[in-house]
Amino acid sequence: MQSVSILRHPLAEEQLQLLRNKESDIVTFRAAITRLGYLLAVETLKDAPCAEIRVTTPMQVEAAATTLKDDKILLVPILRAGLGLVESFLTFLPKARVAHIGMSRDHETLEAKLYTNSLPKNTSDFEQILVLDPMLATGNSSVKALEVLIEAGFEASKIKLVCAFSVKEGLAQINNKFPDVKVVTAVVDPILNEIGYISPGCGDAGDRLFLI
């Protein structure tokens, strides 16, 4: 799928093995997701909105330069696991706005249910919208979040979905329903198991970030 960008780097692999390891405690897991988030941010922001400026160097020479228009970027973590990636992106985007979409999953039907939405009304103010969620499994939560964004007036072509782990089922659902939305992921795992979890994956990212 042309809309999917896979992060391939030894530094990312190191963080992925820490996230996968069931022996990693909450401190290790949080640190690994933050470090992986930095790498995902670098990959995701290759086409970030920028402005051309002029600066004067210590040599008293004027030079052309580029500055990020990070105030034109909206971060949308899907609660709760998406919060684990916010700090990493804000490190590079200190002026970015953050809105939250809260999603719960019915463990029997695997359907996603919206329980909170703090999206801004001024949709035209943003040139790039980054939806953050460590896990793209069935894709149901991400699809619901994207539906909320589109209904709010955001353009699909301005949206990127950023995740650590993904599977082909989730990627296919995003591609089929939102072909203009780009996906950035650290890895595509082999299967979605019978209870809707990524395998081998890392378990429940939200639980490992906040509860264990």
Image (cartoon, grey):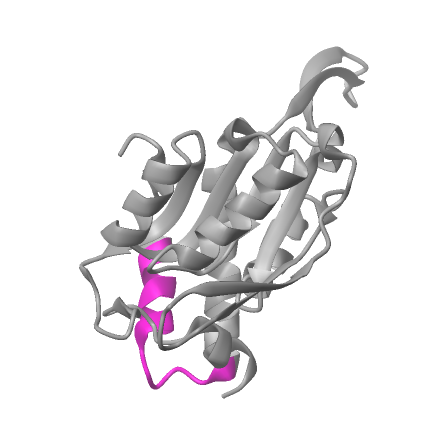
Which of the pair 2/108 is nearer the observer? Answer: 108
**Residue 54 x %, y %:** 76, 14
Which of the pair 150/204 is nearer the observer? Answer: 150
**Residue 208 x %, y %:** 47, 79
**Residue 144 x %, y %:** 50, 52
Question: Residue 21: within the magenta?
Answer: yes
Please name the residue shown 52% across and 32% down the image.
156
Question: Residue 140: within the magenta?
Answer: no
Question: Against 57, is 121 above or below?
Answer: below
Please name the residue shown 50% across and 60% down the image.
35
**Residue 119 x %, y %:** 71, 48
Q: Determine which quarter of the picture holds residue 86.
A: bottom right
Please name the residue shown 18% across and 59% down the image.
190
Please name the residue shown 50% across and 74% down the image.
206
- Does any portion of residue 87 appear in the rendered image? yes
Question: Against 153, is 119 above or below?
Answer: below
| Quadrant of image for the N terminus | top left
Horizontally, is 171 left or right of 53 in the view? left
Residue situated furthest left in the rendering: 190
Question: Against 25, is 86 above or below?
Answer: above
Query: Exactly how many numbered labels are in the figure?
Result: 0
- Does any portion of residue 8 appear in the rendered image? no
Which of the pair 179/202 is nearer the observer? Answer: 179
Q: Determine which quarter of the picture holds residue 136.
A: bottom left
Horizontally, is 179 left or right of 47 in the view? left
- Secondary structure predominantly adopted by residues drawn in magenta: helix
Q: Which residues are magenta?
A: 12-26
